[in-house]
Image (spheres, helix red, strand yellow):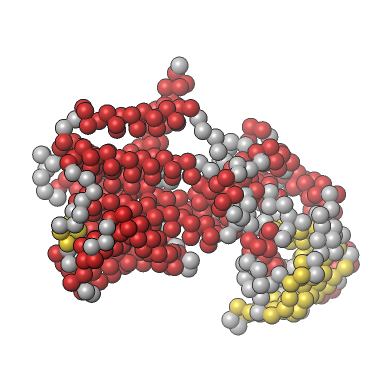
Amino acid sequence: MSVSLAVTGLVKRFGGLLATDDLSFRIDPGESVGLIGPNGAGKTTVFSQIMGEHRQTSGTIGLDGEEISGLSTSARIRRGVCRTYQVPRPFPDLTVAENVRVGQMPDSIWEMITRSGDRQREVELALSVGFAKGDLDRKPSELSMGNLRKLEMARTLATEPRLMLLDEVFAGLTAAEISVIAELVQSLRADGMTFLIVSHDLKALEPLIDRAIAIDRGAKVAEGPYLDVIKNPRVRASYLGTS
Amino acid sequence: MRLRWHHLALWAALVLGMLLLPYLVGNGTLRTMIFANYLAIFAISWDVLSGRTGYVSFGHPFLIGIGAYTTAILTKRFDVPVEISIPLAVVATMVGGLIVLLPALRIKGSYFALVTLAFMELMYQLVQVIRPDLTGGTRGMSGLPTLTRGAVNGFYLSTALMLAIAISMWLLMRTRLGIALAAIGMNEESVRGSGLSVTRLKTFAFITSAFIAGLGGAFYIHYLGSIAPRALFDINFLFTIIVAALIGGAGTVVGPLIGAFFLTFLLEFLRPYLPGAERYFVYGGMALLIYMYQPKGIIALFEAGLGRLGRSR
């Protein structure tokens, strides 16, 4: 079920700002990689380019050896990449179950109309991220930040991804909620899911990843085992703002 | 899609009630009902686009106008039979729906609403200036072929059309498609992030809305037998459509239907007391009250009432 991602020579310019600076990295199937860097380093911009929400200025993005730069976001998601957002984006007037249902829908209007979808799978997904049966009919406005993140995980899992990009999954969570999400990531890793994870909470991030990539001002400054990367003087300097 | 027996029972009761109505009320009431039926069609059409996807159209008379003018010109100037002119009018309106879709690919919210308002205004000016020999210019056209004679037949035809549209839209919106379209109105990015092609869904909503508007517009002018640009591209007409959908309950199909009947009969009821434009003042206030009390419209009030009834039993 896993997938490899190869980013080569990625460059993204917003006018005069170089948001991604000749970035190259590779993630092997089943691997979990942490993407770290100070605020404004361009981590989220990398995510939006992989998803096709922003088109890169130059460079290539390969999924299982196939170039996906020309594909729309929804086409990329159908190929098995998906992302979560720093700020969860639920559908406020839909219930938890219906939110998950949207992730499960086929990208075909005809099938949406004629086929009713797998309700059992919908419930399974919601329960797998830690919702209780009684939560299924609740609206997002009644949910805590931790539950909103779980909901976002369930909805993205419903698209049947093979590679998940998680953006600041621990932001705004209590310690208990962090451990729930961490457990979920671990169990998905055990099933062979490939991950690229952005987090400022390095302590929570460490056990979830096989290695780390540090970027600053859009360029890679270090890559390797987590401890080596955070001990790297250039990485430390970038976090402390000295150069 | 799950259908509940009480929903079907309510639709059956509505159909039956409409069938029996001409035996119970006079022709005057039936004529009012005909207007309510057409308003319901327009409100449902508006709701498919704006109530669901959140792209608030202020230019719905633009679409209705395309349908109305196409069939009016074809029948009056080229002697095309209505059996052909109405389908052509619907197709033309669907093309119009694609034109309205264009700005929706780039802008949303109040900007989109303003652009659609401009569409309506533009069309109003164009039909007066360009080829008035075809459009009838400022005065419009009269003596168009009518489909029915008498209030009873007009009532049955408009009711059949309205119910066919309402029931098919109601069924359609109960499928996953209805949820997907509503999700666009809540968070378009998340719909895209769920792997769905938002543009395709929006195109479907706009074309479906246009289809209904074209059908309604074409049948409406063949009921009236005339077309007047000043009444068609009127801001009051536009607001009546939007207010009907909003006070009935946007995003629900049944809501706009209820809203249309409520509004039409409210205006009719007020007519003897307030013959002039003051009536619109009253209905504006009424709409505001309902909206402040229950933003989800009359249908939400019904549902709350039914819920209370169910609990007390």
Q: Quadrant of the C terminus of chain B?
A: top left
For image coordinates 22% across by 32% down, the residue present is B22
| Looking at the image, residue A223 lies above or below residue A31 | below
Residue B165 is left or right of residue A54, and the answer is: left
For image coordinates 48% across by 68% down, the residue present is B106
Residue B198 is left or right of residue A31, and the answer is: left
Residue B237 is left or right of residue B250, and the answer is: left
Extreme residue toward the bottom, this view = A16
Q: Quadrant of the N terminus of chain B?
A: top right
For image coordinates 23% across by 52% down, the residue present is B222
Quarter of the image for residue A59 reads bottom right
- x and y percentages locating residue B181 in the rendered image: 50, 51
- x and y percentages locating residue A198 in the rendered image: 74, 61
- x and y percentages locating residue B28 in the rendered image: 15, 37
- x and y percentages locating residue A218 in the rendered image: 71, 75
User: From where the camera sits, is residue B4 visible?
Assistant: yes
